[in-house]
Amino acid sequence: MSLIPKIEKVARDATISHFSLMFGYKLFSLYFPLFLVARGMSLPEVGYTYLLIYLPIALISPLVGFLNHKINPATLASIGILGYSAYALGMILIRTPALFYLWQVLLGISAAMFFVSVRAILISSRLENYDRAFGWFYTAPFYVDAIAPVVGAAFIWKFNFTGVFIFSLIIQFFTAIFCLSRLKKSYQKTPHQKLRSGLGLVSNQVRLWCGIFHKIKEKNILFPILISFSILLIGGFYQAFFVLFLKDLLHWSQNLILIYNSISSLLFLPVSFFVIGLVARQKSERNIFQGSFIYGIFSALVGFLLSILNFWTILLIMIGQGFGGLMVGAGRSGLLSQKLKENPEEAGALDTVFSPLGVALGALISGTIIGFLGYQPLFILGGIFIITVSLIAKKFAKF
């Protein structure tokens, strides 16, 4: 039996596209919270900035799902990648705060185009195992974290931020070409789409969404999704403030943060193989519940063990949290793929809405209360919140 789980061709090409996109973005994104604070932004303003990135993803995703009926999703995904390229250019040319915030919104729109479209391609492909395929797709950022920030730091040191933005722009351009050439033929239209056009398409979309919302109200779908959303809320806090926590509270240097990021990602590589194999053997609902419980425990541990935290304890705790988070993400996408498999465009849009909406709200809420509550209580309460939601949902849904 191979130690590396099976990956189907379309899942492989989608994962490579995701990897390349995130590589270009994460050349500089690790330093983004530090960059914002260095610009004089307060912690609440850091939260607002993340809201401007992630909220447009949630708002635009249904529209992208609508467009996927008329335009091949691979084309829309490639346009989204080029949007990341334009974002890098915008960071070079930026001159005013208004333009800075505008570029964050445009980045969110670009992300929606990529993630909705690629999810639609995966869901439409009638994969052998959706949890496993999305497990591969969601591991791409972990692999990127092992190398992109180090490469980005070298470019920043040698050529300042202008150099790293230009390098990112080039990578995204070639990623768009790869995505279009490899995924365009992978999209499988559902038969009834041929009948849609003009106002008929709009009318069908309204009916479809009403049917979808009615379907996800079922307990065996709604409660697993609520568990997943609780993870995403806490994930918004980590996305916006974890690097600042390492710098301000644990007094880590930028070099130590870089080393930690690379080592944790390298160590997570074999862990991710195990997780992908695990989620492929279980039902999606079970993956979500088990993953959330693991994520909640390790999130709370950061707060409870704050006085004895060091490089190695942080490393172990965050690998454990990543283990749980990957299970939940793969389980959620697998669940929606199976329950809404006849409507891959809408399923891809709905799946994409949850992630950015949770992160956006999590960053906003934590940015609002972190000033008077502090890091430690937020870690503890976040973990307890996830565990509580998981136990309540499991009792009502009985999965």
Image (cartoon, rainbow, N blue to C red):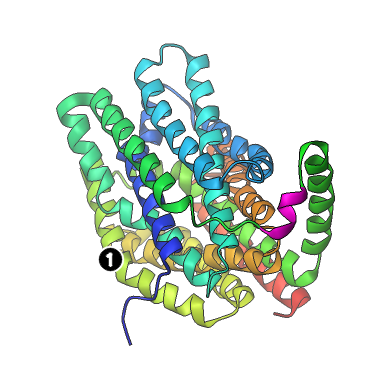
- Could you tell me if residue 45 is visible in this image? no
Residue type at numbered disc 1: Leu
**Image: magenta residue range:** 190-195
Of 183 and 167, which appears nearest the observer?
Answer: 183
- 149 above or below 101? below
Question: Residue 330: percent from the left, percent from the top?
Answer: 53, 66
Question: Residue 319: percent from the left, percent from the top?
Answer: 37, 65
Q: In this view, does 155 lie to the left or right of 363?
A: left
- 274 above or below 236? below
- In which quadrant is the N terminus drawn? bottom left
Magenta span dominant secondary structure: helix
Residue in view at x 33 percent, y 45 percent? 23
Q: Is residue 8 left or right of residue 357?
A: left
Q: Residue lying farthest front?
A: 194
Whether residue 260 is in magenta: the answer is: no
Name which quarter of the figure residue 142 lies in: bottom left
> What residue is disc 1 on?
267
- Could you tell me if residue 221 is visible in this image? yes
- In which quadrant is the C terminus drawn? bottom right
Question: Residue 325: percent from the left, percent from the top?
Answer: 49, 63
Of 343 and 240, which appears nearest the observer?
Answer: 343
Whether residue 193 is in magenta: the answer is: yes
